[in-house]
Amino acid sequence: MTGARSRHDGGSDVTISDPKRSAAGLVAVAVSLRRTISQLGVTDTARTLKALNQTDGFDCPGCAWPERQDRDIIEFCESGAKAVADQATHTRCTPEFFARHSIAELAEQDDYWLGQTGRLTEPMIRRAGASHYEPVDWNEALTIVADELRVLRSPDEAIFYTSGRTSNEAAFAYQLLARAYGTNNLPDCSNMCHEPTSIALQDAIGIGKGSVTFEDFDHADLVIVVGQNPGTNHPRMLSTLEQVKRRGAQIIAVNPLPEAGLLHFKNPKRARGLIGHGTTLADIHLPVRLGGDQALFRWLTRRVIEENAVDYDFVERHTEGFDEFREALLQDPVDLCADIGVAEAALQATWQMVRSARRIIICWAMGITQHRDSVATIRDIVNFTLVTGSIGRLGAGLSPIRGHSNVQGDRTMGVWSNPDTALLDAISDTFGFDPPRAAGFDSVESLEALRDNKARVVVSMGGNLARSLPDTDTAERALAGCRLTVHISTKLNRSHLVPGELSMILPTLARTDVDRQASGPQFVTIEDSFGTVHRSIGRLQPASGHLRSEVAIVAGIARRLVPNCGVKWDDYQSDYRTIRSDIARVIPGFERFEERVLQPGGFLLPHPPRDRRQFRTPSAKAQFSVEALHVPYHQPGGLILQSLRSHDQFNTTIYGLDDRYRGVTGGRRVVFVNPDDLDRLGLRAGSLVDIVASSTEPERIARAFRVVGYPTPPGCAAVYYPEANVLTQIGDRSTAAGTPSFKSIPVTLRAIPLEPSRPPLNGTCLAL
Ligand SMILES: Nc1nc2c(c(=O)[nH]1)N[C@H]1C(S)=C(S)[C@@H](COP(=O)(O)OP(=O)(O)OC[C@H]3O[C@@H](n4cnc5c(=O)[nH]c(N)nc54)[C@H](O)[C@@H]3O)O[C@H]1N2
Ligand SMILES: Nc1nc2c(c(=O)[nH]1)N[C@H]1C(S)=C(S)[C@@H](COP(=O)(O)OP(=O)(O)OC[C@H]3O[C@@H](n4cnc5c(=O)[nH]c(N)nc54)[C@H](O)[C@@H]3O)O[C@H]1N2
Ligand SMILES: [Mo]
């Protein structure tokens, strides 16, 4: 089974200590510097960190949390420093490396090892039947890609995936290439991430994006952070949460786990943060059960209605469907404590806090989106914001926190398997070719199409589908069954090692690198989680003279495949201003793009609900919706399992083997279980177990995990992504958005007898 391949298997080297109760502080500074200096040396570390997230520097290749206009001279976090160290590393993965190691040999290594091989330096090809990758020149590589695409029976046999680091310019060119060629098969990482958010918000308020900016955080009375771990995944958000607290406003954290970054923050930019106890963030932590959020928001909304706290002025003027919604909601059982997983007293305290707040922001991320009923949950979150009039009011709003640094921008640029007619019409009007109208495959549908031989070529603009998709075994087989796999990548990853009959690794510039084209040095643009579009300019010398920018690679394929589609591919490549000028013609909100993006800090895209309480739904009103209440309960003898990120990874890229805040050191194959469940299941902390997905055919097993007793709610366990992906079936996905249910997998734990040579771990049962 796939999961068993790691050198760091079985958690044998893992040590466990108590989880931390505060995030950042001096340790974070020390780790940031140690990591960057070890990868880049002292001089490049200084040069790089100074430019990180500055208006004339480059955008962090980590998360999508925005920068303030009046940003600090140091505007990065530990996770950002690690992301930069990973990309700007001086280690190189060269043709000699590929000559030394066969693909089969490399496939035996784990993700951490693969990530340590450094930046790719030259285009590589695995020719049919070959055991090794070998160098190939760019002309031959791009010609093969175009030739292979040209001979497919239908353009819909090709899949063009995008991971969310790709710049606006490259994304715009890439979706034009796919559509001029003739397919809407443009899956993206968003399909596995915030797709439920985009769908729920589009239907409810007429735009699939969040409705807040920093100004709102500056005026909020209450910020509710739901299903998100900012201490690890969006650490710069902690400064904003700290400011919220210092103004006297309040924070509620809704999370099964007591994540350190939700409890206390030691701001490394202030002396007190370095030596003191830090700022307390969450006033209330609600340890909801996995998937208990929908019940929570319905309970709260019912309180709002029953205790006469509805913003009737907003509801009457700006919404539709309130009466039906209220009637349906009042049918809910009065006592939802068990469904939420939280005691009545804590709910009442939460209600008091909500009752006294006029300006409420709700933030959420993967803890909400990666469930079967995620769209319904988000609609119920929106229902709550509508009864409280929390949209289009200063200090209030919906704040989905995006993942990849440009995932929101890639979608704005048209990377979308289910595009709206307006976009396709604008493309047709501007370039004169007729883009396909039928929807293409999203990420999981692409996997199904590959499995069923309906698709035969995958082009992957970033990403690591072998590890990020559900059902790892099928994903690997699907990639290996392709006629051609093309990976436009910065670093080696598992997907390169399950090559199609022909496979290509096309090495590309990273965000940190200088991008020089025929017209001179180029910048690219990025859209953050609040909808601000700004510049990013690389500062470091590229890892090798052979690297090409993502734009140049797209243009190189396009020039050979669709030379006469009305897009000026040569100009696109030589001068990115040409691309921006076309974006301005095609994408609404980008008028005078070049001029406005040259302003320091860039510009904010329009958001009608936020700006004017205007809702572009069919009725021009925000929509209440009636949703069925659903809670994923575990079976007797089983658990519900979530998969999440450690403090030392970026998605499928594993930076290191420590999860500092959760007290895990030296390994990743651990499963966090509530101590009461250990008794119920007849297990002990330190036991070695296989994790078995319930009722799947064939049986799905993730092998050899150490049990850690941890303060997670009863019945709810946790394990790291991507080790857990083998457990998620392709069919387990959000009913309305297709996003895999990575955070509610029904499982059982099967004990593996301990070998006599391996004593049980000490200290694996943590104090609650
Ligand atoms: N350093 C670093 N930064 C990153 C990433 C990274 O891997 N590393 N990834 C980037 C990407 S692409 C994304 S999408 C984001 C992800 O950012 P997050 O969404 O913060 O990522 P996860 O680690 O998946 O954490 C989910 C959190 O939700 C909680 N949770 C799980 N299930 C539930 C539930 O049912 N209800 C509630 N209320 N909470 C729940 C978990 O306990 C955990 O705290 O981060 C981005 N930033
Ligand atoms: N079990 C489980 N599975 C999950 C999740 C989960 O929480 N649990 N989360 C899901 C989420 S939220 C997401 S977003 C997906 C992410 O899934 P993917 O987008 O498929 O994966 P990443 O790990 O982000 O991609 C990493 C690779 O991108 C390449 N890369 C890095 N920077 C660049 C660049 O600038 N340009 C190019 N061209 N390539 C680059 C590198 O080669 C690197 O190996 O995974 C999903 N899968
Ligand atoms: Mo994501």
Image (spheres, rainbow, N blue to C red):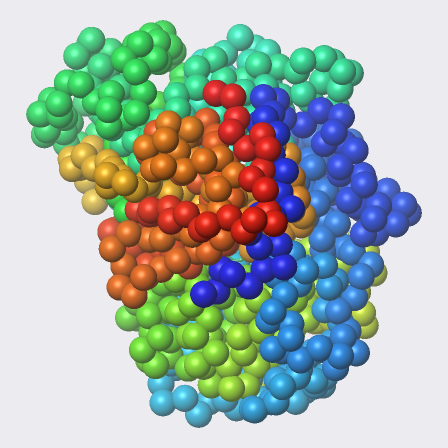
Q: Position of residue 136 (x, y in %)?
A: 70, 86
The residue depicted at 61 percent of the width and 49 percent of the height is: 757
446 sits to left or right of 512: left
Q: Quadrant of residue 717?
A: top left
Q: Quadrant of residue 94?
A: bottom right
The residue depicted at 62 percent of the width and 54 percent of the height is: 8
Q: Is residue 625 above or below residue 307?
A: below
Q: Quadrant of residue 679?
A: top left
Observer-nearest of 548 and 522: 548
Can the viewer see residue 651 in this picture?
no
**Where does the N terminus fall, quadrant-wise?**
bottom left
Q: Is residue 719 above or below residue 288?
A: below
Please, which residue is most extreme toward the right here?
Answer: 43
Can the viewer see residue 666 in this picture?
yes
211 sits to left or right of 311: right
Q: Position of residue 242 (x, y in %)?
A: 59, 19
Please, which residue is most extreme toward the front here?
Answer: 756
Q: Position of residue 485 (x, y in %)?
A: 52, 78
446 sits to left or right of 580: left
The residue depicted at 21 percent of the width and 44 percent of the height is: 618
Observer-nearest of 15 and 391: 15
Observer-nearest of 761 and 490: 761
Tag count? 0
The residue depicted at 37 percent of the width and 46 percent of the height is: 749
Q: Position of residue 284 (x, y in %)?
A: 43, 15
Observer-nearest of 416 and 105: 105
Q: Is residue 243 above or below residue 546?
A: above
